[in-house]
Amino acid sequence: MKAVVKSNFRKKKAIQGILSILPTIIILLFMRFYPIGEAIYRSFTNWNGLYQNDWVGFQNYIDIFTNSPFWTLLRNSFVLLISVPFQIVIGLIIAVLLYEEVAGWKFFRAIVYVPQIISAVIIGYLFRIAFGLNGPVNFILRKIGLQFMNIEWLGNSASALFVLVFCLTWFSIGWQAIVILGGMAKLPPSILESANLDGADFWQRTFLVIVPMISRTIEYGAIMSIVWTFTGTFAFIYSITYGGPGYETTTIDYMIYTKFYQASANYGFATALAVILLIIILILTFIEMRFTNKASEWE
Amino acid sequence: MNEKIKHKTTKVIIFFALVILTISNLYPLLFVFLNSLKTRPEYLTKPFNLPNLDQLAWGNYVTMISQFQILKLFRNTLIISVLTIILLLTFGIVASYAFSKIKFIGREVIYFLIISSMFVPVQVTIIPIYMMFSKIHLVNTYWSVVFTYLGMFLSEAILLMTATFRGIPDGIIEAAELEGAGYFDILRYVIVPMGRPAIVLCIIYYFIVTWNDLFTPLILLTDMESRTVMVALASLISRYSGDPTFQFAGLFLAAIPAILVYAIFQKFIIKGIGEGSTR
């Protein structure tokens, strides 16, 4: 009798469990798994969103690799990745400074993260204004006699990419600093006390004592930032350069948007780009998971 | 003695380094605000000066509200953010409760599948989602954006909340069950109060993310009536001929809600990021 009650109770709980996850499963089926499958399938067609939907095999992929600005897009993403080491090094220094808990450090810690709270649309527009031909940056350069640097910053490939890298770095430093500070908080304070910071040894202590101890945190921050550079920069590019001049600052994710809005929409081509982006992200995620597994083996 | 002075000097240097950082992070907002109170010629000739205090150009703000109708855009964005957060929490809390505390067949496999969908960027799924919504006439509705957000954020929120709910002792739940507490009683009196830090973090974090987002509403909301504040601003600033000081007024207003929420709840966010839960 008791066993029956118990088994009924278990059954009831199991049903409750399944019903609890049902809404989530339904939403993810429609909003994630179906669209991923659909994107992969359509990437092998010449779908234009309407009537045209013929199987074309790998044609879209061949077009992307041989007859499209794809390699420029990939180059641009890699150039934007230059921002990652700058974010980490500056974020690390800020985290070490915050760790000293000088007067008002909690206020400073809150301020460090502020760029992340401002919409990319706003930040991007500010950078576009700042580096415009008659913008504040050129205004200062003229005032201090650097006439030759008074250029159309967003008008050519190298300087436009520089502005983007600068912007992404400014935006991400605070995130890195808070992540690294979180990593440092997990260390026993006694280790870091011996590394308290003054004078000439600051750099040695930061890079030779602290960095090895929080290498896991830095790896995590680096990979998350790399993934983000491939998938999260759309609004910055949209509001600073529109991917231009030409395709000189367009990245893969931005190109998906461009292809989606073109009059002669080729969704097959756009979804093939999406699949390539997905593969890049999966590889990066796999690397991150390898790191995580390695870390849990050490523990 | 010497050591002490040295130590003190170090602290002072660090303090000033952090002050410089503060200026670097806050000056852009100040720049936007000060220049939003100038007229166009005033901005173009003296971008770094204070605005003329006798003739502050409040007109920029008046036009923002009366003609650009920024308050209507705020309302649209707020509806989308609030609906997203309510559904995200409703579905997320029950699912996380099940994943952390209820045993059933296939739990681990399903959890793994749900979490692994987290890494798929929205750009991959957006075209099929757009076509699906256009078939059922949901494009240009708030729901299209809300459901896309649910797809993007549910797994992340579940990861965060399941981790927190696992820390709730089983004994409390068993004791409540023995006293006759049902499924919803346990959610209401045990899970939600004890999982509060994760739930609060979700509310704040996803409010800021959805308020600031551009990509998803840019694709799904194309008509003037339903678009969000960031979509409207993006189209306003894309007109090169526009008046920059007027645009500054819009940017400043649009930045306020997220910054206000952050200013009040920053403790939760800093803790959440430091523990490695969100990006």
Image: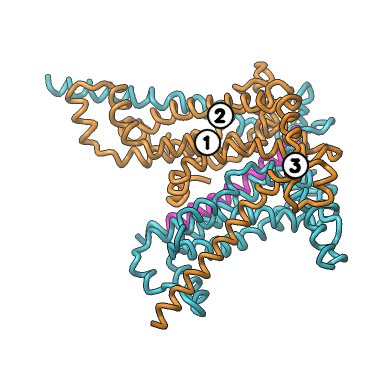
The residue indicated by pointer 3 is B54
Point 73% across, 42% down: residue = A254
Of the image marks 3 and 1, the number of the one nearer the N terminus: 3
Mark 2 to mark 3 CA distance (whole Å): 39 Å
Disc 1 chain ID: B
Disc 3 chain ID: B
Q: Is residue A275 magenta?
A: yes
Please name the amino acid that badge 3 sits on. Asp
Q: Secondary structure at mark 3?
A: helix
Disc 2 chain ID: B
In this rendering, would B230 be left or right of A16?
right
Q: Image quarter for residue B59?
A: top right
Looking at the image, do the residues carrying marks 3 and 1 touch, with CB atoms under 8 Å apart? Answer: no
Please name the amino acid that badge 2 sits on. Ser
As displayed, is residue B183 above or below residue B31?
above
| Spot occupied by residue A74 in the image (x, y as percentages of width and height) | 73, 52
The residue indicated by pointer 1 is B206
Is the image coloured rainbow, by chain, by secondary structure, or in one colour?
by chain
What colour do you see for chain B?
orange
Please name the amino acid that badge 1 sits on. Tyr
Q: What's drawn in magenta, residue-wise?
A: A267-294
| Spot occupied by residue A206 in the image (x, y as percentages of width and height) | 49, 71
- The extreme front residue here reads B54
Same chain? Circles 2 and 1: yes
